[in-house]
Image (tube, grey):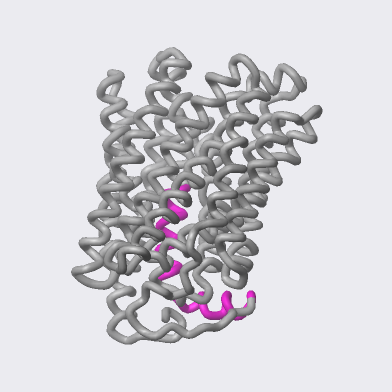
Amino acid sequence: MSEPRARGAAFSLGVLTLINLLNYLDRYIVAGVVPRVQAEFGINNTQAGALGTVFVLVYMVASPLGGFLGDRLQRRYVVAGSVFLWSLATVGSGLAGTFVALLGARAVLGVGEAGYGSVGPAIISDLFPRDLRTRMLAVFFTAMPVGAALGYVVGGWIGATSWRMAFFIGGGPGLVLAFLMLFTPEPARGASETGPVAEEQIAFLEGLKRLWPNRVFWAATAGLTAVTFAMGGLGYWMPKFLEAERGMDPGRAGFIFGAVTAVAGLGGTMLGGALGDRADRRGPGGGLWVSAAGMIAGAPFMVLAATVSGEAAIFTMAFIAQVLLFMNTAPINAAIVNSVAPSYRAFAIGLSNLTLHALGDAISPTAIGAVADASSVAMAIRANALPVVVGGLILLWGARQARRAAATPSPAAS
């Protein structure tokens, strides 16, 4: 990679990573301001929960459309427009005069973030060669736990004084980042591939037709869905477990668990990126093998986190579990972009986002809550380790399929 191109790629990665951090910050601000919103609008817990549900539903439905547009238009413009839209929606959340208006603003946030979430990884895959791709995606995805933690902080700290100001502070920087995105280089689709790349625009149904027989894509998506289910349930119910079944102060439990998640997410994502690149250089499917190993190894620590009693032991087990689970983020996403042609990568990422949310964190809090009602929160968290093991086994199968696909390339996976 030439020096000017390397500088441009680094600038783009930096802007995209900052946008991703803001992406998760704006998602999770609402969690920190819920009590103040309830007090002002007089809504119950079910209505307050709808603020999170409407975002996830709109985001997952809009993701394939965002990816479809990202495969056809200048991607930097799609990203800039998406960031601008969701930032306006975040600021608009602070201006909402009724609960219905706030609900609508959170829905628009889902539309904006869907356009970005489908396109960002596709841009990075064209900026960096395959032997660096997993590590670069790891940098991009470290923004997930850090942004989420900052969302809790901004919502809780600023929101304690004014919940509206928390949304203003969260949305403002996005308007600047949308402008910066316009000045990032637009890599050609497939620019970092080693072989020839066909320049074509794939129709929506044709994209589905090509992805249907792609076993590596579906294995990676299934594994990512399983870990999203588990992590969504763990994040939702762990504070309740710490308070109700281990007697911790709610504020202390939420703060420590949030800090543990942020540090574990940062470390686990970067570790997974480094190990994934190394494993991929050794052979096809190496990154999926790393992800599978992390998930299977992390499951027992999830069980232990809900079994041990002392605070130090609980948070140590939770930290190790989350490091191992976050290890999968970059390798699985790299496997997804590597398994499809550059001409419809953004669409494939959008479809993967739809699947992982629809079958993952959109339903896991309710499903795990039902198990908790039937037994205990601790037992529900232990049971939550099962989908992690299943996902890891699916990824091992996916790694085997990747080796087979490399030995006998097929149009569906090329």
Q: Nearer the viewer, residue 22 or 202?
A: 22
What residue sits 69% from the left and 41% below the top? 89
Tell me where the magenta segment starts and ends, as one range.
204-228
- Residue 58 lies, with reference to residue 405, above or below; the image says above
Quarter containing the C terminus = bottom left
Residue 171 spot, x, y in % from top left:
62, 36
- Of residue 324 and residue 96, the one placed in the foreground of this image is 96
Q: Residue furthest toward the left?
A: 282
**Horizontal relation, residue 155 to residue 317: left or right:** right
Residue at 60 percent of width and 20 percent of height: 159
* Nearest to the observer: residue 177 or residue 29: 177
Q: Is residue 346 left or right of residue 331?
A: right
**Residue 219 visible at all:** no
* Residue displayed at 49% across by 46% down: 20
Q: Up-down: is 240 above or below 211?
A: above
Placement of the N terminus among the 4 image quadrants: bottom left
Magenta run includes residue 218? yes
Question: Residue 160 lies in what quarter of the image?
Answer: top right
Picture residue at 35% right of the left edge, 83% below the top = 195
